[in-house]
Image (cartoon, coloured by chain):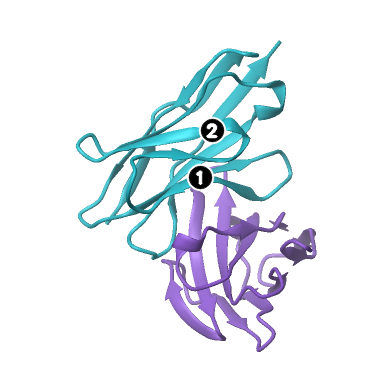
């Protein structure tokens, strides 16, 4: 079985500051890793994914994530956030294409 | 290009009733997956359909069922509704089977059971 832990339920940050949203996972098999974002009253939007290869993955809207196999982590980063980045962020793992197993989410609140 | 369309957006049902939710995937996408989102349990996988066949199923009781039509549109049905079924039901489509393609999610159907 797989599990996903998003270490922070809420992350407040000032506009133009850097941010890191942390995600750890456990799995007995190889997994694909994802970050999704959910804006209020909307569905989820794919930010980025790691399937294989380079451990640094670049996504949309300036986000990137780094896969660390030894620490079983997949932290999401952005060097400078905007007000419009305020949303709920979900980390998810998928054992080789099977269904997504989501974390509980991290609420990112960007203030001026 | 039209996104994933879920209808209706909101539903209010009474305990014991049944409900059918609809999902139209992005044109050309052949895979549809359903997820339930609640404040307590978060996002949980219900089922995945590909080319009209159920490919995977999550850990939900048999009251939850689904199907996919030849045009890739999908429906999910919940019978004998319980208060705990109140949730946002999200549909996601992708070009092929499996999560590696990345899902495109609809805005969801918010079901309230009273």
The chain coloured purple in the image: B
Q: Chain of mark 1?
A: A
Of the two numbered discs 1 and 2 on the same chain, state the one appearing first in sequence.
1
User: Where residue B34 sits: x, y (%)?
Assistant: 57, 65
The residue wearing badge 1 is: A48
User: Where residue B58 sits: x, y (%)?
Assistant: 43, 67
| Outermost residue, bottom side | B70
Determine the secondary structure under disc 2. loop
User: Where residue A96 sits: x, y (%)?
Assistant: 33, 62
The chain coloured cyan in the image: A
Q: Chain of mark 2?
A: A
User: Position of A33 compared to A41: left or right?
Assistant: left
A67 relative to B8, above or below = above
* Residue A63: numbered disc: 2
C-alpha distance separating marks 1 and 2: 8 Å
| Outermost residue, front side | A54
Q: What residue is shown at x 49% (from left), y 81% (from top)?
A: B54
* Residue A99: numbered disc: none
């Amino acid at each position: 079985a797989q599990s996903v832990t998003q270490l922070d339920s809420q992350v407040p940050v000032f506009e133009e500051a850097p941010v890191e949203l942390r995600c750890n996972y456990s799995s007995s098999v190889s997994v694909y890793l994802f970050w999704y974002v959910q804006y209020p009253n909307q569905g989820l939007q794919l930010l980025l994914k790691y399937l294989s290869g380079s451990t640094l993955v670049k996504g949309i809207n300036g986000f990137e994530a780094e896969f660390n196999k030894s620490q079983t982590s997949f932290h999401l980063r952005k060097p400078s956030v905007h007000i419009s980045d305020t949303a709920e962020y979900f980390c998810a793992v998928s054992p080789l294409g099977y269904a997504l197993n989501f974390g509980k989410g991290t609420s990112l609140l960007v203030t001026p | 290009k039209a996104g994933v369309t879920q209808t209706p957006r909101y539903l209010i049902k009474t305990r014991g009733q049944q409900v059918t939710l609809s999902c139209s995937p992005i044109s050309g996408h052949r895979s549809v997956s359903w997820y339930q989102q609640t404040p307590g349990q978060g996002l949980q996988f219900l089922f995945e359909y590909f080319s009209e066949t159920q490919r995977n199923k999550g850990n939900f009781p048999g009251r939850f069922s689904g199907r996919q039509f030849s045009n890739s549109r999908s429906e999910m049905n919940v019978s004998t509704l319980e208060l705990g079924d109140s949730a946002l039901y999200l549909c996601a489509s992708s070009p092929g089977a499996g999560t590696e393609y990345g899902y495109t999610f609809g805005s969801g159907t918010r079901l309230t059971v009273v």
